[in-house]
Image: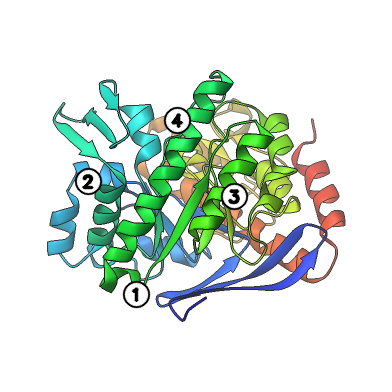
Amino acid sequence: MSERFSFSIHARDGKARTGEIAMRRGMIRTPAFMPVGTAATVKAMKPETVRQTGADIILGNTYHLMLRPGAERVARLGGLHRFMNWHRPILTDSGGYQVMSLSDLRKLTEEGVEFRSHIDGSKHMLTPERSMEIQRLLGSDVVMAFDECPRADQERDAIARSMEMSMRWAKRSRDAFDGGEEHAAGAALFGIQQGALHEDLRTASADALKDIGFDGYAIGGLAVGEGQEAMFGVLDYAPRQLPDGRPRYLMGVGKPDDLVGAVARGVDMFDCVLPSRSGRNGQAFTWNGPLNIRNARFAEDTAPLDEDCSCAACSDYSRAYLHHLNKAGEILGAMLMTEHNIAFYQQLMAAMREAIAEGRFADFTKTFLYNYLQP
């Protein structure tokens, strides 16, 4: 690995590992959770507050940013980091998943995907080359290869064809990324393994990606409705199919117990909209499980959301006040609940890093799951 991107594993405990990714805009401690800033913002949070929770890296999205405000405009304004006032690493999703999930009218070919915007119906074409160009214009630090993410319940033959095309798109992404020499000199490119729930297809996908060569490798095609048991079944083998000395990124996951189970199976990086979306809808994640602050039992509860959390929502406000804000539809309620959830996720990652480093991850997992999943 080069100075622009390096990954070091500092400790292992079973399959779990902790380490660091070094990039020009800062260090990323792993296991890492990336708050999702889809449209150049983590909803209901200021970038400096996101950083204060302990986040080392955030995620932006190619699909949403290409449609609004436009990648070329962001580039003219100095790039995504300056635009949103986040000066640490940013990973950008390739846009492939959003094209498939958000665009009602789309045409998939070997060249790419032609689709109509979910915002105004305008027509666009997204290809591996265009995805790399958009991520270059945004100034992304970790660029994701362009792929297709099929539903896990599709026929095996359809999933196989999709995976094989995604691998051809991965090679085109690699070539296009390398062609943007100035950007490539300071950024990293991750490939995405596909194959849904089929071990042999994931083996073939991993082999194809390793032949191409990437800085890191993502496990795609999960967290799309298959359930935790099926997801963990894939994670029992998928991480070891990927290079041991490179970061492994599980895309779109997940609930706190999902994260702990995935780290136990060798995953290093995560992203998910769940903590911010749940916060806006009145759900808080705590060490003793999730709670719905809108529940009437919190109306006169003077305790903090979580006694073991030091975020602003827990330090300065009661459950009763947060209950009131959420019932009244006050914006402050969404802000405080989101900040707490992002802070909790970062505290969870820090606790896992510490447990792995001290060789007690199995005990940590047992205790965490007992408290978090209690009835």
Which one is closest to the eye, mark 4 or mark 2?
2
Identify the residue position indicated by label 2 in the image: 66
- Tell me: residue 297, above or below residue 252: above
Q: Which residue occupies the foreground of this view, 45 or 174?
A: 174
Q: Could you classify mark 4 by the number of other residues whose Cα lies within 10 Å: few (under 14), some (14-19), or many (20 or more)?
A: some
Q: Amino acid at mark 2?
A: Met
Identify the residue position indicated by label 1 in the image: 185
Name the residue at the bottom extreme.
3
Which quadrant would the C terminus be assigned to in this image?
top right
Q: Earlier in the sequence, mark 1 or mark 4?
A: 1
Q: In the rendered view, does 364 fall on the left or right side of 334? A: right
Identify the residue position indicated by label 3 in the image: 207
- Image quarter of residue 256: top right
Q: Amino acid at mark 4?
A: Lys
Residues under labels 1 and 2: Cα distance? 23 Å
Q: Amino acid at mark 3?
A: Asp
Q: Which residue occupies the foreground of this view, 60 or 348?
A: 60
**Where residue 28 sits: x, y (%)?**
53, 69
- The residue depicted at 50 percent of the width and 22 percent of the height is 158
Identify the residue position indicated by label 4 in the image: 327
Q: Amino acid at mark 1?
A: Ala
Mark 3 residue element: helix
